[in-house]
Amino acid sequence: MKRTLLSFACALFALTAAAQEVASPDGNVRLKFHVDGTRPTYELAYKGREVVRPSHLGLELARDKHASKGQRETDLMDGFSIAGSETSAVDETWRPVCGETATIRNRYNELAVTLAQQSTGRHIIVRFRVYDDGIGFRYEFPQQDSLNYFIIREERTEFAMTGDHKAWWLPGDYDTQEQETQESRLSEIRGMFDKAVNWGNSSIAVFSPTGVQTSLQMKTDDGLYINIHEAACADYATMHLELVDAETSHLSTGLRGHSNAYTPAPQPSPYPLPAPMTFVSHLTPDATGLKGFMQTPCSTPWRTVMVSDDARDMLSSDLILNLNEPCAIDDTSWIHPTKYCGVWWEMIVGKSSWNYTDDFPSVQLGNTDYAKARPNGRHAANTENVKRYIDFAAANGLDQVLVEGWNTGWEDWANMWKRDVFDFVTPYPDFDIKALNEYAHSKGVRLMMHHETSSSTQNYERHLAEAFGLMNRYGYDAVKTGYVGDIIPRGDHHYSQSMNNHYLHVVKEAARHRVMVNAHEATRPTGLCRTYPNLVGNESARGTEYEAFAGSRPDHTCILPFTRLQGGPMDYTPGIFETQLKNWSDNPNFVHTTLAGQLALYVTMYSPLQMAADLPENYARYMDAFQFIRDVACDWDDSRYLEAEPADYITVARKAKGTDNWFVGGKCDENGHRSNIRLDFLDEGRRYECTIYADARGAHYEHNPKAYVITKKTVKKGDVLKITEAPGGGFAVSLMAR
């Protein structure tokens, strides 16, 4: 690792009592900071073009007996002056355990401003890191006599936009990201909001008709791409954004939805509204209605703004990862990329069940006698069926087999707000855990554990050590967790400070047991996989399962890399070949991509954890196409984003870790796309065996999804591949070095 830390003179930093300025290493990104009257204020420019107009910083604090100043507490919003500043520069290189590239460069210029609040005698620090592709900044709170304990009522960080930008957004929600991305002008969010909310989700808590989630992707009329998110969210609440538009009279004070969480209505802010087209941070509360309980020394997560005039830079940026702390696990040799299949899709579609019996309307762990129950005949996690998946994995080079529904309690698991819902160690009578693990290991395959918590986090933490101990005993090294339903402790939300602490606690405890974690329905990722690389995947978005519920738009997977994947890899569960579900079940829905488009996802949506999500019998009819899933890597030495436009198309080339082989994937929306791919990234003087999996002529995601063609040829550096992507389709290419 190379690291430099330098002090800079006036050439890079202009430091005056009135304003301070810092530029990125390449000079394209420029940040200005000053105190506007007594309020901290920043602004941002890119290549001389305004990106963020002057925007205020600050936090409203709660008057509470648990705070250092109790009922005499005052806000950290105004009354500030600059007490000092420090500047530095860093240029270092680090190696991710798994990643899109073998190494990541972390290069930035830093400005840390110390602010003094004269009326309270308090000091806080605002730290800015300016990269070539954007900025990160956070609030830091040194320990001091007058600031030991404080409670955040609301963070009021502003992001003042320069116009009515096009935006790709999700409704702001305290409990779910399983929404479909909307595309509109900022001014249109309010009018579209109610129809945009997925009201049918098991937990919904929306706070404002102009509230949106991060990562928020935007595009200006003059061609700038802007993304707002956060990095390193630990011991803090998840941030949303509330847009002040022409109709806003006050910031949010209400809550809508059918979440059973209890949240007191927030109090109106006493501070004036910013100008329209300004986003204001909005933190997820806990059951008290408060947003954060802090003990100094401490800091907030980084607030991030990425900017470029090239959409590809949004996808290749490492800014979020770089703002996280280095790896905290000494020995990472047990963390590895994984390709898996599993007993899952047949339950999601509705052909099979998670529960063993239909006899019990209610289950009490330790008291309900399953030996006396009649099997329902639809339970998928039975020994013989799991063996079938193990055989398929072994025959096709897949590493693991996920099994959902293996443990007792699924008869009344969902939406009962039930504390003692699962014990995570007791199998159903028809699931022989010992024999199945022995069988899998004899075939060179592992089973992947499944821990659905039904959001009873108290119960999960109580059983966690025993559950991981069971995994260690039988040779499991990975677990998929789930958090469906309303949170227990009752009254909390999925993205509160306490829940974010829970998710991280599980990851840390898993690391002690050398277990990798794939978390579903958890908080949206903020790059913590750098610090804890055993967090190999999250769902935290609308995944493939929604294709069985009503479908997702064809452009869905063309926007997720710009939004959800900014914070870390997603377990999207691709690979559905039989897209017409009625062909093997009673489900009338269909998957809104072509078969070739499904193959593309293994490359366009980075994850070290990739599932072949369809049934073995469905793959059996398309084994020539399945060859790509067998061949494609999950871990990479290099990645090149060749084409990109949010929600329209993405084309990326990746070099498999430790090899000279490349894979290319392209995915498009409902309009189709024509790709011209210059193979300039290949090694000079080398030949490659090229296999192209493409949409056939006449393919269409809706009426002809399984029409594909496979072409083989020999190629070299500089050759051009011309590939037509069907509406909702895509392509995949393997380039095997000779």
Image (cartoon, rainbow, N blue to C red):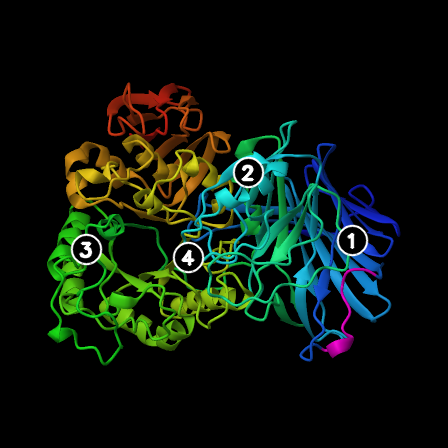
The residue that label 3 is drawn on is 444
Q: Type of residue at label 2?
A: Met
**Magenta segment:** 68-78
Could you tell me what secondary structure mostly forms the magenta stretch? loop
Residue 604 place in picture, x, y as percent: 40, 37
Asked if residue 686 shows in the view, the reply is yes
For residue 376, side relative to residue 186 (left or right):
left
Q: Are marks 2 and 3 in contact (CB under 8 Å)?
A: no
Quarter of the image where one finds residue 458 = bottom left
Give the spatial CA distance, label 1 vs label 2. Answer: 33 Å
The residue that label 2 is drawn on is 314
Up the image or down, 712 lies above or below 554; here it is above
Up the image or down, 465 lies above or below 197; here it is below
Callout 1 secondary element: loop
Asked if the stretch drawn in magenta spans residue 142, the answer is no
Comparing labels 4 and 1, the label whose residue is closer to the camera: 1
